[in-house]
Image (cartoon, helix red, strand yellow):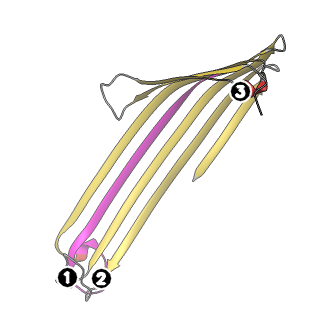
Amino acid sequence: FYGYTTLSYKVNKNLEVVGRASATTYDLLRTEKFPYSATTYGREEARGDYREDARKLFENNTELLVKYNKTFFNDLSIAAIAGGNIRSMRFNSSFVTTNYLNVPGVYTFANSRNPVIASNFSSEMLVTSVYGSLDLSYKKYINVSATVRTDKSSAIPGSEPSTYPSVSASSVLSDYIKLPE
């Protein structure tokens, strides 16, 4: 199952608030019946096997954004975004297999010749993020952009939040200076 939704509210012609949410989930069960007469590397006795591999995942992303766009004096344009995101994920898996079969063609764990082999795994993660961007442009002369993002992840316990800033500036000289052909 994959689900996405967005809700947008335009406060005025310059200010907009956007909320988004998405969810992904699955519940898989894979079974394998290995014939009694077949062999494979590490299983040379040719006595068959039965396996079940079960996996479950649930992931959710929820985000809130505030967007602002305005031009002042017909010369200075500002575009800004501020937001936050929460991502949560839960994963569980279980793998169970016989250790050769007693009776050919009977694919159940009760038919395991030796003790059943089982393993499982579980994982959870929570990432919280805040971010923003600011774009300024003056006429056609210069554009300046700045961004920042800070993440805190439960996958790195005890760590400080990670921050990722950036700044850039650009100008196209040929837009306002006559250059030689």
Disc 1 secondary structure class: loop
- Residue at x 42%, y 44% (from the top left corner): 90
Q: Is residue 100 magenta?
A: yes
- What type of secondary structure mainly makes up the magenta span? strand
Disc 2 secondary structure class: loop
- Residue at x 21%, y 65% (from the top left corner): 117
The quadrant holding residue 18 is: top right
Q: Is residue 51 magenta?
A: no
Query: Are there few (<14), some (14-19), or many (20+) residues within 10 Å of tag 3?
Result: few
Q: How many marks?
A: 3
The quadrant holding residue 83 is: top right
Give, as a three-letter code, the residue at label 1: Asn
Between marks 2 and 3 in the image, the one whose residue lies nearer the viewer: 3
Give, as a three-letter code, the residue at label 2: Val
Residue that mark 3 sits on: 172
Point out residue 166 in the picture as x, y percentages from the top left corner.
Answer: 52, 24
Residue that mark 2 sits on: 106
- Residue at x 74%, y 24% (from the top left corner): 16
Point out residue 129 in the picture as x, y percentages from the top left corner.
Answer: 50, 27
**Left or right: 120, with 153 as reference point:** left
Q: Are marks 2 and 1 in contact (CB under 8 Å)?
A: yes
**Mark 1 or mark 3: whose residue is earlier in sequence:** 1
Point out residue 61 in the picture as x, y percentages from the top left corner.
Answer: 54, 37
| Span shown in magenta | 81-110
> On residue 102, which mark appears?
1
Q: Quadrant of the C terminus?
A: top right
Give, as a three-letter code, the residue at label 3: Val
